[in-house]
Amino acid sequence: MCLAAIGCVRSVRREQGVLLAQVDVQGREMTIGVDLTPEVQPGMYVVVHAGLALQALTPEEAADALALRADIAAADPGHG
């Protein structure tokens, strides 16, 4: 099963007409497309799936989602 991840935006840039962001996802830096969420700025959180930011999150929403994911992983260590 593919799951979306929560990432913290580190920087945003436009490259060859495409809006990109450098994002930290669970300690892993990755470059993702943010054309679907052009409002993102460094320090914001996004839902990342398949190399794209699908939704911007408030810090509170991100904290809640990350806490829920941690709870699920703790309950079933084989699927965290």
Image (cartoon, helix red, strand yellow):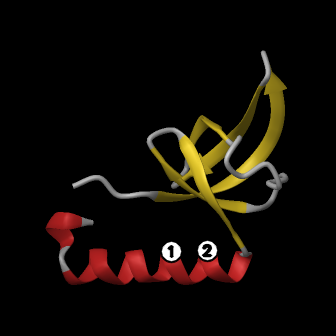
Give neighbour class at mark 2: few <14, some 14-19, many 20+ (Cα, 10 Å). some
Looking at the image, which residue is at 53% across and 52% down? 48
Q: Residue furthest left?
A: 78
Residue 4 as seen in the image, left or right of residue 19 = left
Q: Residue 18, image x and y in percent?
A: 74, 26
The residue identified by callout 2 is 62
Residue 67 as seen in the image, left or right of residue 79 = right
Report which quarter residue 60 is drawn in. Answer: bottom right
Report which quarter residue 59 is drawn in. Answer: bottom right
Amino acid type, label 2: Ala
Image quadrant for the N terminus? bottom left
Give neighbour class at mark 1: few <14, some 14-19, many 20+ (Cα, 10 Å). some
- Res. 26 mark: none
Circles 2 and 1: CB distance less than 8 Å?
yes
Residue 37 as seen in the image, left or right of residue 79 = right
The residue identified by callout 1 is 66
Image quadrant for the C terminus? bottom left
18, above or below 39, in the image: above
How many numbered discs, if any? 2
Looking at the image, which residue is at 71% across and 41% down? 35
Looking at the image, which residue is at 51% across and 55% down? 26
Looking at the image, which residue is at 15% across and 66% down? 78
28, above or below 78, in the image: above
Q: Residue 9, image x and y in percent?
A: 73, 51
Amino acid type, label 1: Leu
Q: Gap between marks 2 and 1, in whole Å?
A: 6 Å
Q: Residue 69, image x and y in percent?
A: 39, 75
Q: Residue 58, image x and y in percent?
A: 73, 75
**Could you tell me which secondary element the residue under label 2 belongs to?**
helix
**Could you tell me which secondary element the residue under label 1 belongs to?**
helix
